[in-house]
Image (cartoon, grey):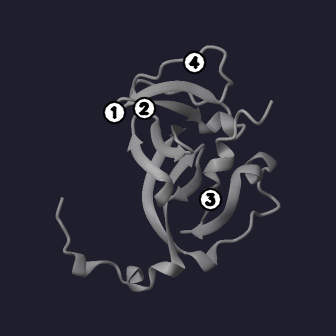
Amino acid sequence: MTNMPRSHAPAHNLSTQEDHKDFVSFTVAGQMFGISVLEVQDILVPTKIASVPLAKPEIRGSINLRGRIVTVIDVRSRLGLPKREVTATERQMGVTVENGHDLYTLLVDEVGDVISLKTSLMEPNPSTLDAVWREFAAGVFRVDNRLMVVLDVKHLLEINAKS
């Protein structure tokens, strides 16, 4: 891997930071999602997830991350998608975020890149977006002929508010 000098940064990064926002992109069931990079604490591959007795289905369990107990949220379950059967050669990825004073790892299929997007290009949720997804979406961007759904992390983590 070569280190590129900072002076060779792509031209799209030369515009003012106020009109761009950076997102960590990831996929769940083939759909691209994004959350603000400012909300992301860590990217990881959770290995030992301890189950939590009597937890709601979207709570996969908990992990120990540098001495802190982190609740693992299954984003597929939260979005009403079927469970993914992970084989020995596959792995699920985790995007760790902070909400309040607690850490949560969002279990996703694959983590993509950090994408810088012009904030004025964010569109409202399309009416064709699944009703469950609309509940957790802050809006959408069109990225390389794909739709990236921007997740409202705080709302996504309001698990106890639902029965």
Callout 3: helix, strand or loop? strand
Residue labelled with disc 1: 66
Disc 3 versus disc 4: nearer the observer? 4
Question: Which quadrant, please, contains the C terminus?
Answer: top right
Relative image position of residue 77 (x, y in whole percent): 66, 33
Q: Quadrant of residue 120?
A: bottom right
Q: For label 1, count other residues whose C-alpha is less than 10 Å away and answer few (under 14), some (14-19) or many (20+).
A: few
Q: For label 2, count other residues whose C-alpha is less than 10 Å away and answer few (under 14), some (14-19) or many (20+).
A: few
**How far is mark 2 from mark 3, CA to CA?**
25 Å
Q: What numbered label is drawn on residue 150?
A: 3
Measuring 63% from the left and 37% from the top, which residue is drawn there?
A: 76
Mark 1 in CB contact with mark 3 (< 8 angstroms): no
Point out the tag, 1 or 4, that comes first from the N-terminus. 4
Residue labelled with disc 2: 90
The residue type indicated by label 2 comes to Glu
**How far is mark 1 from mark 4, CA to CA?**
19 Å
Relative to residue 117, is residue 30 depicted above or below?
above
The residue type indicated by label 3 comes to Val
**How far is mark 2 from mark 4, CA to CA?**
23 Å
Relative to residue 8, is residue 44 depicted above or below?
above
Q: Nearer the viewer, residue 40 or 149?
A: 40
